[in-house]
Image (cartoon, helix red, strand yellow):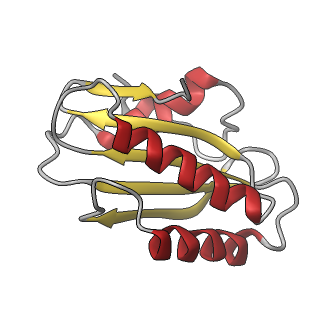
Amino acid sequence: MASSSDIIPDHPLTDDAALLAFVTFLHDGVTPRRRTLWFVMLDGGRRPLPVIVPIDHVPDEPDGHLVSNLGRAWHEIVQDEPGAAVLLMLERPGPAAGSSGDRAWRAALRSAAAEHGIPLAGFFLATADGVVPLRPE
């Protein structure tokens, strides 16, 4: 598990290990009681911007209105930041294995980011069992 000493301010998150350490630090070993979607904006050098947002009580399946609003918000945040990306973590109760709802969220949010020209740096699933990358099947 990542500790605060593993996270270096302004240090680029350029590989999967660095991304995992960062979101593991955010998750901090909690036992989720509800679904929370976290997003972190990364600048063109893949350094976290001072925008880390948790959104509580997200539904099991993607909500089109919420997804669309997130895409627009990400665009507004990074419109003057060439090469910016978004890093996502879905925190929820239950087993660490990704569900069809988790994969649907990943697909919907990836699509929303792409619609605004924002790469998805990573999508992670956080449960009481820890944090794992959620990749497409």
Residue 25, quarter of the rendered image: top left
Can residue 29 be seen here? yes
Establish if 66 lies above or below 85: below
Residue drawn at (57%, 21%) of the image: 17
Residue drawn at (14%, 39%) of the image: 31
Residue 5, quarter of the rendered image: top left
Q: Position of residue 55 (x, y in %)?
A: 35, 66
Q: Return the residue nearer the eye: 8 or 50.
A: 50
Q: Return the residue nearer the eye: 47 or 31.
A: 31
Can residue 25 be seen here? no
Q: Left or right of 43: which side holds 110? A: left
Q: Position of residue 129 (x, y in %)?
A: 21, 24
Q: Left or right of 128: which side holds 97? A: right
Residue drawn at (37%, 37%) of the image: 100
Quadrant position of the N terminus in the picture: top left
Residue 95, quarter of the rendered image: top left
Quadrant position of the C terminus in the picture: top right
| Number of numbered discs overlaid on the protein picture | 0
Q: Left or right of 86: which side holds 39? A: left
Q: Position of residue 86 (x, y in %)?
A: 63, 53
Q: Left or right of 100: which side holds 9? A: right
Farthest-out residue, right: 82
Q: Position of residue 77 (x, y in %)?
A: 68, 73
Establish if 87 lies above or below 74: above
Residue drawn at (55%, 54%) of the image: 108
Establish if 127 lies above or below 40: above
